[in-house]
């Protein structure tokens, strides 16, 4: 019963936190959006997002619960609209981590490479797909190729 209540609460929270879709951003020509919370007469920033003309999120800013800048993600896309790079900066605008994403000829994400601020490879996520194009596995490996974890995806069809 508790799990059911938790599940319902999660769904309600996730729908209330839902941001504008890419289609809506493009249709309404939204350049940026922000969220704030007001408690006890004090307004605190929660987040800010900047969009490009195609409706892609190109910069996401997060604040901690006191409203202090926590992190900034600067995102780059390829001509097909796929995310190819995500640079994460801390509250002092110093690079923390860089994520590079690669795709195959079918447009399926095949690899995510994570680098630290010095450009040293930290880890990789490697993705595999079945003949229908459904993701079957995400394997995380360290820089030497040692497997750190494997996440399997299974599907049930009607």
Image (cartoon, rainbow, N blue to C red):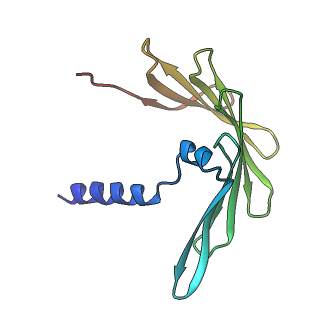
* Left or right: 11, with 116 as reference point: left
Query: Looking at the image, which is closer to me, 32 or 99?
Result: 32
As drawn, 38 above or below 7: below
Q: Is residue 37 left or right of residue 62?
A: left
Residue farthest toward the top in the current orientation of the protein: 131
Q: Picture coordinates of residue 123 (x, y %)?
A: 65, 35
The residue under the point 58% across, 85% down is 42
Q: Quadrant of residue 68?
A: bottom right
Q: Which residue appears farthest toward the bottom when viewing the image?
A: 41
In the rendered image, the quadrant that contains the C terminus is top left
The outermost residue toward the front is 28
- In depth, the one of 87 and 120 nearer the eye is 87
Residue found farthest to the left: 1
Q: Residue at x 71, y 56 (%)?
A: 72
The x and y percentages for residue 108 are 56, 22
Q: Is residue 130 above or below residue 139?
A: above
Numbered circles on residues, count: 0
Residue toward you, 64 or 55: 55
Measured along the vertical axis of the image, is residue 16 above or below residue 96?
below
The residue at 82%/44% (across/down) is 118
Choose top left, top right, bottom left or bottom right for residue 3: bottom left
Location of the N terminus (image quadrant): bottom left
Q: Position of residue 114 (x, y in %)?
A: 68, 38
Q: Seen in the image, is 90 located left or right of residue 149?
A: right
**Residue 74: image x %, image y %?**
73, 48
């Amino acid at each position: 019963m508790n799990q059911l209540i938790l599940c319902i609460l999660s769904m309600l929270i996730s729908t209330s936190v839902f941001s504008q879709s890419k289609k809506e951003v493009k249709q309404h020509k939204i350049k940026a959006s922000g969220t704030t919370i007001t408690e006890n007469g004090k307004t605190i920033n929660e987040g800010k997002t900047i969009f490009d003309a195609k409706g892609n999120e190109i910069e996401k800013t997060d604040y901690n619960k006191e409203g202090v800048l926590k992190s900034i993600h600067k995102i780059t896309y390829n001509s097909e609209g796929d995310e190819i790079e995500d640079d994460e900066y801390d509250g002092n605008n110093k690079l923390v981590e860089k994520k590079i994403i690669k795709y195959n000829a079918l447009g399926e994400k095949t690899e995510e490479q994570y680098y630290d601020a010095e450009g040293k490879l930290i880890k990789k996520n490697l993705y595999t797909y079945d003949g229908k194009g459904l993701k079957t596995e995400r394997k995380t490996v360290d820089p030497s190729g040692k497997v750190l974890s494997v996440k399997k995806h299974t599907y049930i069809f009607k």
